[in-house]
Image (spheres, rainbow, N blue to C red):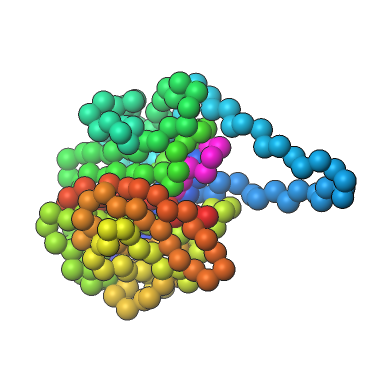
Amino acid sequence: MRTSSSSIALVLILAACGGSGGGGGPDASGGPDGAVAIDAPLPVDAPLPVDAPVVVPTTIAISGKATTQELSGTSPVAGLAVAAFRVADDATPLATATTDAQGNYTLSVTTNGASLDAYLRATKAGFVDLYLYPRAPLDGDFAAANLDMLTMANVGFLNTLAGGGQQAGKGLIGLTVTDAAGAPVAGATVSSTPASGNARYTSGGLPSSTATATDADGVAFLFNVPGAVTVTATKAGMTFRAHLVNARADKFTTTTVAP
């Protein structure tokens, strides 16, 4: 496996978790949620605007691309089984799909007109099972649900390089900290409740055992996660939204933390 600045960092940049339709669901990953509009000021005597209720489509599309890092570079993962589940129901998939030769997939999920609190599971022999949690319930299409698949060798390399001290029977979370527009945030720290083990960050594009906050890529890792935890981030002058993820034992979980 390459050890250049594009190896682990590109796999774990978590663009998958950056954006979702409507009510700020991720993004992983992940990708930007779109530019933040600046409203014109209201006249002094104008009535205060009333927020229109969010209208959730009865069906939303969740789509993305699955990739993995190899010696030759980033490659698509074909034949990956992808399923969406409600957070409250781990047994019954809402929709399933299989990635094509280019690693692409699309899930069509019925919402019944309500925000969807859901996660994705991606599995294939030879890879560590991946769980992707949006940063908030989905109320529209999620078109950047990219899946960064790791082999056990990838996980071992990450653990060694970051000095994570990962133990068998514990979870591993990869996070991206972003601003409201989906741009990575440098200088943030991440944490979970209940507390995980070591929090690690990147430096120069690679996982680091000494970095104390996110670099320009916004990427962080939580090692030895005890299970279901609430994740959040901290940076002076910014407030981040906390959300729940379930870091299953010996699996890899990705998400995004954003305002």
Camera sees residue 24: yes
Q: Tell me the quarter of the image containing the N terminus.
A: bottom left
Q: In the rendering, at what x and y percent does residue 93 appear?
A: 29, 27
Q: Residue at x 49, y 68 (%)?
A: 235
- 83 is higher (above) or lower (below) than 246: above
Task: Report whether 158 appears left or right of 244.
Answer: left
Q: Residue at x 52, y 61 (%)?
A: 239
Q: Residue at x 23, y 39 (%)?
A: 123
Q: Quadrant of residue 118?
A: top left
User: Which is more toward the observer, 195 or 106?
Assistant: 195
Camera sees residue 71: no
Q: Is residue 59 magenta?
A: no
Q: Is residue 22 magenta?
A: yes
Residue farthest toward the bottom in the current orientation of the protein? 210
User: Which is more toward the observer, 211 or 225?
Assistant: 225
> Which range of residues does the magenta coloring cover?
21-27
Q: In the rendering, at what x and y percent does residue 192 appear?
A: 32, 59
- 12 is higher (above) or lower (below) than 214: above
User: Which is more toward the observer, 143 or 192?
Assistant: 192
